[in-house]
């Protein structure tokens, strides 16, 4: 069972790193939304391509703006935090219980 436990630990750790990277991508997206960034810049295009599918879904379900500010990045950030603290830790606990 230790092989399965190690597999679950590896998956949980990779998932944690991917979620952590997505938070930084989301922060980059928020920062470029406040400055007049060139939309043809490859970095700006990457940030839009990486975040638009999720942010558009949140905007469609919860059209939230406060004084002209888009609050969907905050909702996505909270969802990522939930996944990090609930799903990743649950996977670690399951893996440690299998040992």
Image (tube, helix red, strand yellow):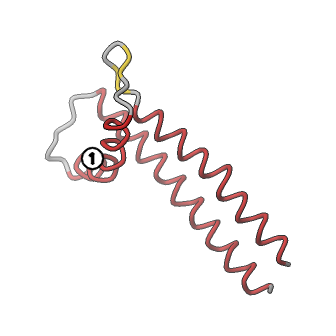
Residue 10, above or below 24 = below
Q: From this viewpoint, which residue is outermost toward the front?
A: 61
Check the picture and name the quadrant holding the N terminus. Answer: bottom right
Q: Residue furthest left?
A: 40
| Image position, residue 70 (x, y; %) | 35, 26
Residue 56: give x, y in percent of width and height: 30, 42
Q: Which residue is mark 1?
A: 48
Work out which residue is located at the far top of the displayed protein and give it: 67
Left/right of residue 32 with respect to residue 6 in the rendered view:
left
Q: Residue 77: horizontal and vertical position, in percent?
A: 50, 40
Numbered disc total: 1
Badge 1 element: helix
- Dividing the image into 4 quarters, which one contains the C terminus? bottom right
- Residue at 34% x, 44% y is 57
Placement of 58 over or under 68, stated as above or below: below
User: Between residues 25 and 77, which one lies in front from this camera angle?
Assistant: 77
Q: Residue at x 51, y 60 (%)?
A: 18
Quarter-wise, where is residue 55 in the image? top left
Residue 99 vs 23, above or below: the answer is below
| 59, 96: nearer the viewer | 59
Q: Residue at x 42, y 36 (%)?
A: 73
4 relative position to 23: left or right: right
Q: Is residue 13 above or below residue 39?
A: below
Q: Quarter of the image holding residue 5?
A: bottom right
Mark 1 Cα shell of 10 Å, populated few (<14), some (14-19), many (≥20): some
């Amino acid at each position: 069972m230790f092989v399965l436990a190690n597999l679950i630990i590896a998956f949980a750790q990779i998932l944690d790193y991917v979620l952590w990277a997505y938070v930084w991508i989301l922060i980059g997206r928020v920062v470029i939304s406040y400055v007049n960034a060139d939309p043809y810049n490859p970095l700006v295009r990457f940030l839009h391509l990486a975040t638009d599918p999720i942010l558009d879904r949140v905007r469609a379900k919860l059209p939230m703006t406060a004084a002209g500010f888009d609050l969907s990045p905050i909702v996505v950030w909270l969802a990522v935090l939930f996944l990090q603290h609930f799903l990743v830790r649950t996977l670690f606990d399951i893996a440690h219980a299998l040992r």
